[in-house]
Amino acid sequence: KIHRIACIPGDGIGVDITNAAEQVLQKLSSTVGGFEFDFNTFDWSSSNYLSRGWYMPPDGLDQLKKHDAIYFGAVGWPDVPDHISLWGLILPIRKALNQYVNVRPTRILPGTTSPLSSCAANPSSLDWLIIRENSEGEYSGQGGTSHEHSPHAIATEVSIFTQVGIERIMRFAFEAARLRPRKKLTMVTKSNAQRHGMVLWDKVFYQVAKEYPDIEIDKMLVDAMTVRMVLNPQSLDTIVATNLHADILSDLAAALSGSIGIAPSSNLDPTRGNPSMFEPIHGSAPDIAGKGIANPVGAFWSAAEMVRWLGEEEAADGLMKAVENVTAAGVKTKDLGGEKNTKEVTDAVCAEIEKL
Ligand code: NAI
Ligand code: MG
């Protein structure tokens, strides 16, 4: 079986880590057997935007739709305002391809440690699955600026929450919670201060919860949630939050699990009508770009999630096992307290795959 992968390296360390992931995925298919990857690489990046004037060509989405999955590095570079790069590439893909769920698992990998002393002593106390609404809410892109060039500029940033949009993310979150041993779902909003959209979130959450009596539920305000994640991590399991809140909470989660460099994400179209997209949660990291020292673990974990979504369960488990054997052996990049570079970690994972 051939899986057609659209690969978009993007900018900065996005290029390093997609190269590393491609190498590991090819090794995985040749070792495990039974399937192959056909990579098609797209040079949609900030430097090409500066010379061509576009991130994605007019038929870009149609080109992506011809693939079984999309593997993404990162987009954004200091020469281009970040809202231009994000809205030029990643946000339109998520929206147009109906990738309304963003799944972000967090746990502490063997051989790595948490900055939280409670988790450093007991790594299994941090094991979360963050479900991020990925299509609407605060990242709807609605609003505008008036009197832009005067000292009296006014800007609005309108969040859009729909019953349909909330219901479908809640259902996905409850189903995801059901598949985990603890069967526990925490819903996050800010419905004390934001009195329309967030209140609708709360309401729909409790409506959908009635269909899942086997799931233990609770509700948190986002500010208090940051405290609970730090002070009481073992009290959380599956978490559902809006586009903005989950974006922020998942960076915190990644830091608490050891480094933003290990954290994966899946942008899913659960209807499978469009290809889903897999990417580490980190950005292009201009501060370390071109040095060959980016941590590729988040990229490998994202690749494993892609392999799983494509139906190759055994290969996905094998890839994660290889990655965990490598971290357990102390072969780690600097962000995890190690001394290895991207290539050394990648070669070590390939060597572990050969032992599968
Ligand atoms: P960032 O995630 O790129 O970097 C934050 C910090 O974490 C930096 O110190 C960086 O060196 C470190 N870091 C990130 N990934 C790492 C890795 N794999 N290994 C080792 N260290 C790592 O976030 P930042 O600096 O806020 O954004 C940089 C650019 O990336 C901006 O243009 C931003 O808009 C863009 N961005 C793009 C995303 C995407 O394409 N999905 C997501 C987040 C940011
Ligand atoms: Mg983010």
Image (cartoon, helix red, strand yellow):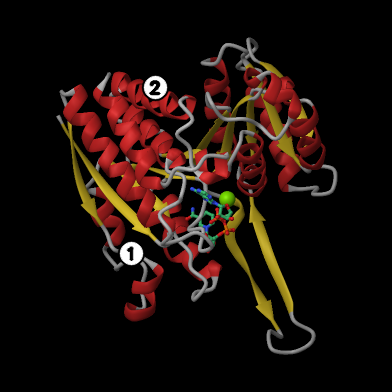
Q: Is residue 201 above or below residue 354?
A: below
* 7 vs 121, nearest the viewer: 121
Q: Amino acid at mark 1?
A: Trp
Judge left or right: residue 322 versus residue 42: right
Farthest residue, direction bottom: 150
The picture places residue 262, in percent across and down from the top left corner, at 51, 39
The C terminus lies in quadrant? top left
Point out the tag, 1 or 2, that comes first from the N-terminus. Answer: 1
Q: Is residue 39 above or below residue 128?
A: below
Judge the density around disc 2: few (<14), some (14-19), many (≥20) Cα neighbours within 10 Å. Answer: some
Task: Let me know if residue 267 appears in the view.
Answer: no
The picture places residue 78, in percent across and down from the top left corner, at 52, 72
* 96 vs 312, nearest the viewer: 312
The residue tagged 1 is 44
The picture places residue 56, in percent across and down from the top left corner, at 33, 65
Circle 1: element type: loop
Circle 2: element type: helix
Residue at 56% across / 39% down in the picture?
336
The N terminus lies in quadrant? top left
Residue at 44% across / 50% down in the picture?
94
Of circles 1 and 2, the one toward us is 2
Farthest residue, direction right: 192
Residue at 36% across / 78% down in the picture?
53
The picture places residue 74, in percent across and down from the top left corner, at 44, 55
Q: Are marks 1 and 2 in contact (CB under 8 Å)?
A: no
Displayed quadrant of residue 219: top right
